[in-house]
Structures are given as C-alpha cells and as structure tokens.
Amino acid sequence: MLHPRAFKVTVVWTLLLLFLGSVVHATESSLACPDWPTCFGTMVPEMSGGVFWEHLHRLVAGGLVLMFSLATWLVHKEVRDRPWILKACWAGIALLLVQSAFGGLTVIYRLPDLVSTTHLALAFGFLGLATYLAAATTSRVEPHGSDADAGIRLWAWAAAGLVFAQSVLGGLVRHMDAGMACPDAPLCLGQVVPPLINAPIITHFAHRVLALVVVLAVLGLVVRVWRGHASAPLKHWAAAAGILVLVQVALGVASVLSVLAVAPVSLHTLVAAGLLASLVYLSGLTSPTPLGEPKAMAATAA
Ligand code: HEM
Ligand code: HEM
C-alpha cells in the first residue's frame, strides 16, 4: 500500500517548508522577491542572498502541492467506503491553494501582521490535516482495543489544540515585533509578572503563560499514556511529544537570550510544528476503529 507513505512524505515535506518559511522571515528575506507569483519577473531568478531563501520557499511550496495531489490520487480508489478521507484530501488541496495566495498577499501587501500570522496559522492547520490523514491511512497490526481510550484521545486533542493556539500566538509575537518585549528569560523585565503596559509586552507575556499550560498538558498526557495499557507506538509518540515540548521551551528561552538569532527562532517554529504533528498522529492512533480500515474489517480484527 503506497498511500500511507505518500501522506507521511507530505508531513515531512510540510515540516521542511515550515522551517524554510521561518528562515525566510528570520533572515529578513520576506520581500527579497518583490513580486508574486514570479520573482523579478521570472520563475528562475538568480538564487543568491535573500532571493535564495524566498524563492526556495516558493519552489518547495509548489512541490508540496504536487506531493499532496499525488497522495490524493493514490488514495482515491481505495477509500470509496470512507468518503471522509477523500473529502479531507480535497479540503487539504483547497487549503494549500489558499495558503499559496496568502503567501503572495504577504509579499504584495508588504507583510501586514494579520496576513503573515494567518499564513502561519494555515500552515499549521494544513500540517495537522496531513498528519491526521497519515495516521488515518496507516493500518494497525496490533489489537486496538486498549488504544481506544476516550480519555487519552480527548487529552491528545486538547493538547494539540493548545499547541495550535500557542503557535498562532507565537506568530503574533513575531509579526508584532514583540520578540524582545521581554528581553530576559525566564523572568520578563526582571519580574515574574511584568508591568502589562502595552500590546507587545502583553502578547509576549501571554505566550509565556500559555507555554506553561502547554507543557503541563503535554506532560500530563505522557504520564497518562505511560501509566495505562497503551500500545508501544502510542507510548513512543507520547514520549516524543514530551521531549519536543521541553526542547521547545529551551528554544524559546534561547531565542530571547540570543536576541532572536536565526537558528533558535527557526528551530522554534520547526519544533512547534513537530510537536503539533506528534500529538495529532497520536490522536489518530487512538481512534476506536483503525481509521485506515473499513468498519467491517475492523470488526473482524477486534
Ligand atoms: C507560493 C506560495 C508561497 C509564498 C509566495 C510564500 C511566501 C512566504 C513569505 C514571503 C514568508 C515570510 C512572511 C513574513 O516574513 O511575514 C513566508 C513564511 C512562511 N511560509 Fe510561506 N509562502 C508560500 C507557501 C507556503 C506554504 C504552502 C506553506 C505551508 C504549508 C508556507 C508556510 C510558511 C511558514 C510557516 C512561514 C513562516 C511564517 C512565520 O514565521 O510566522 N508557505 N512565506
Ligand atoms: C512550549 C510551547 C511553545 C510553543 C508551541 C511555541 C511556539 C511558537 C511559535 C510557533 C512561534 C512563531 C514562530 C514563527 O512565526 O515562525 C513562536 C514565537 C516566539 N516564541 Fe514561542 N513557543 C513556545 C514557548 C515559548 C517560550 C517558553 C518562550 C520564551 C521563554 C518563547 C518565545 C518566543 C519568542 C521570543 C517568539 C518570537 C520569535 C521571533 O520574533 O522571531 N516561546 N513560538
């Protein structure tokens, strides 16, 4: 079966694209190509300076549209009994096209905060969808009864939702230029609660408070999965999420202490995306029926 692999490749591709997008911003290359969809009127500009990052981001984005379309084509015949998978694929293609238009708008309107933040939110939304499809089309060989724990599933979705909200808030921090509104860490302006006197400080501080909630939610999930009778893949994905959330906090602190150096801020975007993907994948694996199999087959296996 080819399609689970095609969706998994899509997920990895999306992670790479998100990382590249973040590098585009961090290296101040966002307006290196002044036009869109061409770059200096051509699809093959000289790949140097900021144009290298910005145009590479566009090319990899084009590749993602092709990759995801291929995954949809591979899946379409085999999921006639699960039409929701095909509908989700069409939604994914539509999302990618809207996302590409938003990428163009960021350039044409010269990076308005809301458009740039929406570009980030749509990227994370697409990543979530592609990851769920990767989990949905993966058949499981082990009995899934023990994984069908509604508590774990709910917890994993809640944690994924929190990570998504925190990431969009992080996008706002970035695009409002509030990254250095708290120039120290772990304290903010030398205090546990800084004077909340302007929008950048409030937004930055809210990002740190929500980080604490995210850490507690993810570590709570790890404890719940490891204490129960969950299968090995579930335990592995929970452990991955636990490690990623701690690395993410360290990268947040490093971003501040390095005065927003390219490496920590770009890795901060990548690890946020990896964390979201691991939680969504885990949620997909806790589905009561194996999502990749028709209901009849699932009943036979159980
Ligand atoms: C041809 C289509 C695209 C164009 C022209 C484009 C353009 C851009 C530009 C100019 C930036 C920098 C924005 C800024 O500094 O505020 C950017 C960042 C980014 N792009 Fe794209 N993009 C495209 C497609 C995509 C796609 C398909 C995805 C993901 C599914 C994506 C994900 C991102 C991410 C995650 C960032 C970083 C946003 C941030 O740092 O907040 N882009 N893109
Ligand atoms: C644990 C949960 C966290 C998640 C999921 C998260 C996620 C994100 C994301 C997705 C962005 C936007 C990056 C972009 O637009 O490309 C961001 C920005 C940022 N985050 Fe976090 N973050 C977390 C914790 C923290 C912590 C604990 C700190 C600091 C102590 C921090 C500091 C920052 C800063 C300074 C920015 C702005 C970077 C810039 O201006 O380039 N984050 N965060």
Image: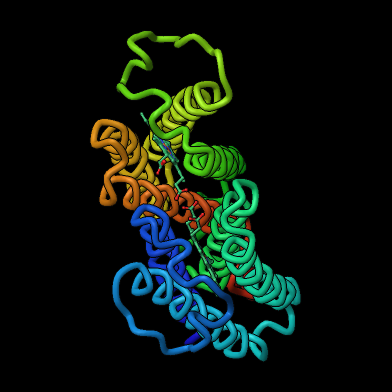
**Relative depth, front residue between 150 and 104:** 104
| Residue at the spot 49% in from the left edge and 9% down from the top edge | 195
Which corner quadrant of the image does residue 152 belong to?
Answer: top right
**Relative depth, front residue between 74 and 168:** 168
- Residue 191 image offset from top left, x and y in percent: 37, 8
Exactly how many numbered labels are in the figure?
0
- Residue 204 image offset from top left, x and y in percent: 48, 28
Rendered view: 135 above or below 174: below
**Relative depth, front residue between 11 and 267:** 267
Rendered view: 272 above or below 220: below
Quadrant for the C terminus, please. bottom right
Q: Is residue 57 left or right of residue 164?
A: left
**Relative depth, front residue between 65 and 191:** 191
Q: How is the image coloured?
A: rainbow
Q: Is residue 225 left or right of residue 102?
A: left
Q: Is residue 19 left or right of residue 198?
A: left
Rendered view: 113 above or below 227: below
| Residue at the spot 40% in from the left edge and 85% down from the top edge | 45
- Residue 185 image offset from top left, x and y in percent: 30, 22
Q: Is residue 178 left or right of residue 96?
A: left
Is residue 250 visible in the rendered image? The answer is yes
| Residue at the spot 25% in from the left edge and 31% down from the top edge | 257
Is residue 163 visible in the rendered image? The answer is no
Which corner quadrant of the image does residue 187 belong to?
Answer: top left
